[in-house]
Image: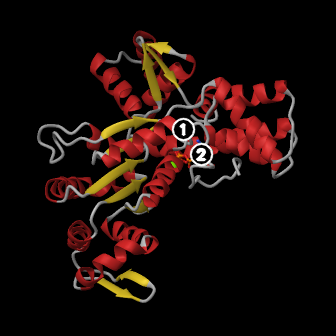
Amino acid sequence: MLFDLNPKTSSKELFGRERELEELIRLVRARRWVAVLGPRMVGKTSLVKVAGAELRKAKTKVVYMNLWGAKGTHGLLKVMARGLNDEKSILQEIKDVAQRVEGVSIGPSGISISISRKPMTTVWDLLMAIGSKAGNCVIALDEVQELAAISGRLLKLLANIFNTHPNIVFIFTGSMFGLMKTLLEPTSSSPLYGRSPARLYLNPFEKELAIRFLRKGFEEQKLTLRDEIINEAVERLDGIPGWLTLYGNNVAVRKLPHQKALEETISEGIKIVKDELEHFLEGRDKQAYLAALKATAISARWTEIKGAVEIAKASPANDATIYRIIENLKAAMLIEEKENVYRINDPMLRTLLLTSQIT
Ligand SMILES: Nc1ncnc2c1ncn2[C@@H]1O[C@H](COP(=O)(O)OP(=O)(O)OP(=O)(O)O)[C@@H](O)[C@H]1O
Ligand SMILES: [Mg+2]
């Protein structure tokens, strides 16, 4: 069902991403590591999961790991165990080797991890077991920014795998913030230097595609909505598949009237975006960043952003500061630049800032 709120897992349910799906599979088959990028709710997890399902059909082993909330090495280990338990074909092949890894035990119900004294070594040994025993396989790390706290050790480990086990291909997704940026733009001193993953961008649906998405979803539910209604939803939600899905679900499953469904979608979206923005602002100059963001809510040039920051701080700002703010906002995918004009691409974030629901 198109309006299912979970990430999609089969190509039948994935709408309008044929090209991206093919590209992801092609890169993985060519053993390129890939980073799937795009704004919140655009469908990154769905794309990765569907690609995983397609690759499995072609007998490639795929381990999917959702790192949300994992934070440190122990978290990573737990997520690894869960991922491996979902992909029994790998477990079968690495069983004998993995059994001997400290902190790992394998029983009838699968792999389990006890508190190991050196969790990073356990991670390493498990990956080596996969690398030497499991043949061609794909490891998808979703919400990879969650590992930012252990990024130094993780990058070294990844570089090592890259060199020693070309049969393991990694797919990374998550927000661009933090670790993702280090993965994608490694400096010459980074262990990943020269081994940066290929980038695959997911854009919101163009207007026509977004309209077709809603129509098809409503058709599945035996509903026909008037053109004006569909148009309004598409416009307010900017073609972001996740918001369109939530809106469609509100109408078709929860049976809310159009306006109410739209309002609830937007307020839900604003809540998510607000949490994320607050997380981003921790430890930063909140006043300056919010001023810059508010300026770009409609759209702004460099000098306008600078002016807005200066007004907010009631003092002159130097160019390097403004440059850094803009770079960080871009890196976090909060704003986009086109021909020297900066703009927020997420409609929820725009509304949040324009209606002063954050100060
Ligand atoms: N191409 C698509 N076809 C059908 N449904 C989609 C598509 N893309 C996204 N969705 C739906 O939109 C919602 C968000 O998708 P998903 O979780 O894959 O996005 P995401 O980019 O990983 O989001 P997040 O930024 O929260 O991690 C889900 O309900 C999913 O089912
Ligand atoms: Mg996701």
| Residue 228 image point, x, y percent | 83, 24
Q: Work out how far the residue at label 2 is from the one at label 1, CA to CA, in angstroms.
A: 7 Å
Circle 1 residue: 17
Which kind of residue does numbered mark 2 sit on? Answer: Leu
**Whether the residue under disc 1 has CB within 8 Å of ligand 1:** yes
Circle 2 residue: 14
Q: Nearer the viewer, residue 318 or 23?
A: 23
Local secondary structure at mark 1: loop
At x 40%, y 15%, the residue is 306
| Residue 331 image point, x, y percent | 37, 33
Q: Is residue 141 above or below residue 190?
A: below
| Residue 8 image point, x, y percent | 59, 52
Which kind of residue does numbered mark 1 sit on? Answer: Arg
Q: Nearer the viewer, residue 21 or 190?
A: 21
**Whether the residue under disc 2 has CB within 8 Å of ligand 1:** yes
Left/right of residue 103 with respect to residue 205 in the rendered view = left
Could you tell me if the residues under marks 2 and 1 are in contact, i.e. CB atoms within 8 Å?
Answer: yes
Can you tell which quarter of the image residue 62 is in? bottom left
Q: Is residue 187 above or below residue 337?
A: below
At x 33%, y 48%, the residue is 29
